Image: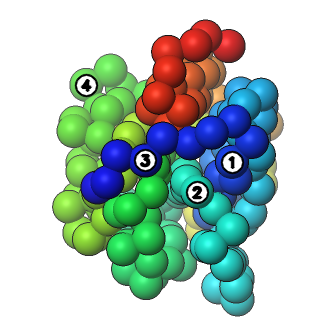
Amino acid sequence: MNKVVLNEGDKVLLLYTTHEKQTLKIMQRIKSHLDKKLSCDLIELLPTAQIDLNHYQAALLGSSIRYGFYSKVMKKFIQQHYQYLNNVPSGFFGVNVVARKANKNTPETNLYTKKFLASIPWRPTIAAVFAGALYYPQYNWFDRNMIRFIMWLGKGDTDVTKPVIEFTDWQKVDQFAHQFLTQTLGSSETF
């Protein structure tokens, strides 16, 4: 990748896919930090999305998994636009409940994120993986029982009466936002 340093006010695309909106919450938190120095557009990547990348000098993509796979829409977007992504400051973060475990919370140790990044032609400038959340009451019967079974296998929380079981480490999210900002602006300012 060419070393590109952004200027304050440059535009950053914050693009995400999500199932229960936890990835959106994480992206909103990151945006709150980046907005202090950069102009950010937060966009949910839907199958019909038409995004003009010429408006952006950097991009940060976030996606969650469901049953072990990242969004097909996100993967297709990356495959179509990897040359752009490889030539601007760019980042990726994955969201999954497995990342709640200390030995599975980095792109190198989280099997889902590691496999995803190895399967695409884009090489993000920065990458992370964050633990997500469980929203048992929002799931349909099949998803609730499948996710509960998966959690049982992984010795996780299986109480379907809790409205939200959040595992996201918000301090880690803040550190990632700072690192992305530092790398894109080429400075080490603090928030």
First in sequence: mark 2 or mark 3?
A: 3
Secondary structure at numbered mark 4: helix
Residue type pointed to by label 4 = Asn
Q: CA distance from mark 2 to mark 1?
A: 6 Å
Q: Are marks 2 and 3 in contact (CB under 8 Å)?
A: yes
Q: CA distance from mark 3 to mark 1?
A: 12 Å
Residue type pointed to by label 3 = Val
Q: CA distance from mark 2 to mark 3?
A: 9 Å
At which x and y percent is residue 100?
Answer: 44, 28
First in sequence: mark 3 or mark 1?
A: 3
Q: Residue at x 64, y 30 (%)?
A: 166
* Residue highlighted by disc 2: 57
At which x and y percent is residue 171?
Answer: 58, 15
* Residue highlighted by disc 4: 103
* Callout in the foreground (4, 1): 1
Query: Which quadrant of the structure image shows residue 45?
Result: bottom right
Query: Which quadrant of the structure image shows residue 161?
Result: top right
Taking the image as shown, residue 101 lies to the left or right of residue 73, namely left
Q: CA distance from mark 3 to mark 4?
A: 33 Å
Residue nearer the viewer, 75 or 109: 75
Q: CA distance from mark 4 to mark 1?
A: 36 Å
